[in-house]
Amino acid sequence: MHKHSPPSTKRLLKLKLNGRWREDAVSEQELLVDYLRDVTHLTGTKIGCDGGECGACTVLVDGEAVPSCITLAVRCEGRNVETIEALATQGRLSRLQSAFHEKLGTQCGFCTPGMIMAAEALLRSNPTPTDGEIRTALSGNLCRCTGYVKIIESVKAAAGVTS
């Protein structure tokens, strides 16, 4: 006897994505990262570990940094989701994005979108964080290239905090 898994049921998901409301039919099991990349074609959100460990897929949900690889898309019903694509306005990088560029906070760039989104959540709630507060806010975001010093300097520069 074969066991058949029940067909995946779809439902309408309505959320505010990068400032615009949209509705899409999504599977109840679809992960937010897959919804963002495959349905909305916002590929700035990266897939790293696929288990909530590395932070590459970090996006903001109602202003809070969350790993989109372990968040169901349907859990974002009626909520405000922001991806790295939302930070630049009219082709101009945000202050935080510019700081990462100027202070060499990015090397291979894979962790950068998630790192920037986690830093964005921090700076919105704490505009002048200490080094320790930055480290804590970014503790869920792993980088294999930089050693984190330039990343912390980038966040401090965006905040206007000098050493």
Image (spheres, helix red, strand yellow):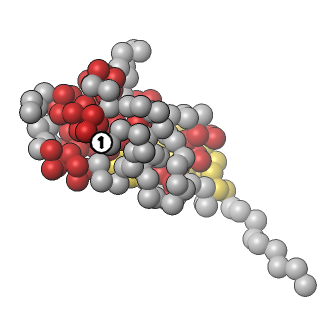
The vertical placement of 161 against 122, above or below, is above
Decide: few, some or many residues near mark 1? Use Cα within 10 Å; few <14, some 14-19, many ≥20. Answer: some
The residue carrying mark 1 is 148
From the viewer's perspective, tell me whether residue 13 is left or right of residue 57.
right
Closer to the camera, 59 or 22? 59
Residue 96, image quadrant: top left
Residue 78 shows up from this direction? no
What residue is drawn where x is 29% and y is 48%?
A: 138
Residue 158, image quadrant: top left
Closer to the camera, 64 or 149? 149
- Which quadrant holds the C terminus? top left
- Which quadrant holds the N terminus? bottom right
From the viewer's perspective, tell me whether residue 10 is left or right of residue 111.
right
Which secondary structure, mark 1? loop
| Amino acid on which the number 1 mark rests in the picture | Tyr
What residue is drawn where x is 71% and y is 62%?
A: 8
What residue is drawn where x is 14% and y is 37%?
A: 127
Q: How many discs appear?
A: 1
The vertical placement of 60 against 156, above or below, is below
